[in-house]
Structure formats: structure tokens, C-alpha cells
Image (spheres, helix red, strand yellow):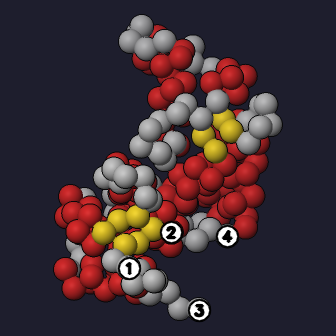
Amino acid sequence: MNENPLISKFRNELLKRGPSGIKSIGQYFRQIDDNGSRTLTFEEFGKGIIDHNVKISAEEASELFRYFDKNQNGQIDYEEFLVNVRPPMNNFRLNLISKAFQRMDRTGDGRITFEDLKGVYKVNKHPRFLSGEMNESQIFRQFLDEFDASSHKDGTVTFQEFVDYFAGVSASIDTDIYFDCMMRQCWKI
């Protein structure tokens, strides 16, 4: 199945900002969802594109919105939209991500929490810990917040949030060999 070229263009615009490009617009969409409907109107969608300086035309934005407005009710599910914007990952990379998550999820409850980090993340050499600027809890929270996609950070990271984060990282790494090397070195898997 051929991908809609506008999705590719939108994705590439976001990935030019690095691994967090897709994550940042996703966070923005969650923040403007005041009523918790998990949907966006075209006006909200357009504002997100403008605020994030995504270089697509108004006509392309309209076409992209219509493509995702499956039931033509004037709203799109932003989570579904973001899932389709993220670059697909092969099973090799997903398997490495799963291994890293399992290594971090010491309690095996499907979430990475402060408790899990205590067993695997040593902060004693972190520059901000050494300078006294941050304590262990603050460093753990900062670490977890990097993966937490919700606008209301809850101090936990689900497997899906972990995968979503690495979808952005994966998109910036061309070869499976380099991705494998990076994951094994960073996560000691």
C-alpha cells in the first residue's frame, strides 16, 4: 500500500527537528485539547502547523486534515494522526526497544517508574547531581518526562510511550546496525 505523499512530507518536516519533532507536536495537540476529546478541529490543527512552523501549504494542510477526517465530522483523532505520521519500524528495531523496556521495567508491571529506575539508573555521576543542582528524584523525574507523551506528566512511562519515543529516534538512524549499536550501548542490552 502506497503512503499518502502528504504524510511523508509532514513527517519529514517534523523529523528535520530531530527525534523529538513528532513528539513535540503531539504534546502540543494534547495541550490544546481542553475538553479531553482527543480530537482536533481544522482550526486547532492549522494552529499547530503554524505554531510549529511546519512548511506545508494551507491547501496541503486542508487535504491532510480531510484525509484523516474519516467520518467527515470536522475533527480528527490526533493520536491516530500521530501514529500514522510516525515512521514505521521494522521488527528488528521493535525487538531491541522491547528488550530495553524490559530491562528498565524491573517490577514487570508494564510501566517504568521511580522504583524501576532506582535499580538501573545511577545518578551519582550525573553533572546536575554532582553540582547539587538536582537530587536523585528530580533526575529520575526528568528522565521519565522525556518519554512521557502526556501533557500531564505522571512519572511513569508505558511501553507504548517508550516505543513512540524511539519511533522518532529510529527515524533519524539510517541503518539497523547503528540502531542496534546505539540501543545496546545506551541500555546495556
Residue of label 3? 1
Residue of label 2? 80
Element type at mark 2: helix
For marks 4 and 1, give the one nearer the viewer: 1
Residue 189 visible (yes or no): no
Residue occupying the point 51% across, 55% down: 169
* CA separation in Å, label 2 and label 3: 18 Å
- At label 2, counting other C-alpha atoms closer than 10 Å, the crowd grade (few under 14, some 14-19, many 20 or more) is few
* CA separation in Å, label 3 and label 4: 16 Å
Residue of label 4? 90
Residue occupying the point 53% across, 17% down: 137
Element type at mark 1: loop
* CA separation in Å, label 4 and label 1: 34 Å
Q: Is residue 146 above or below residue 136?
A: below
Amino acid at the residue labelled 1: Asn
Residue occupying the point 41% across, 43% down: 151
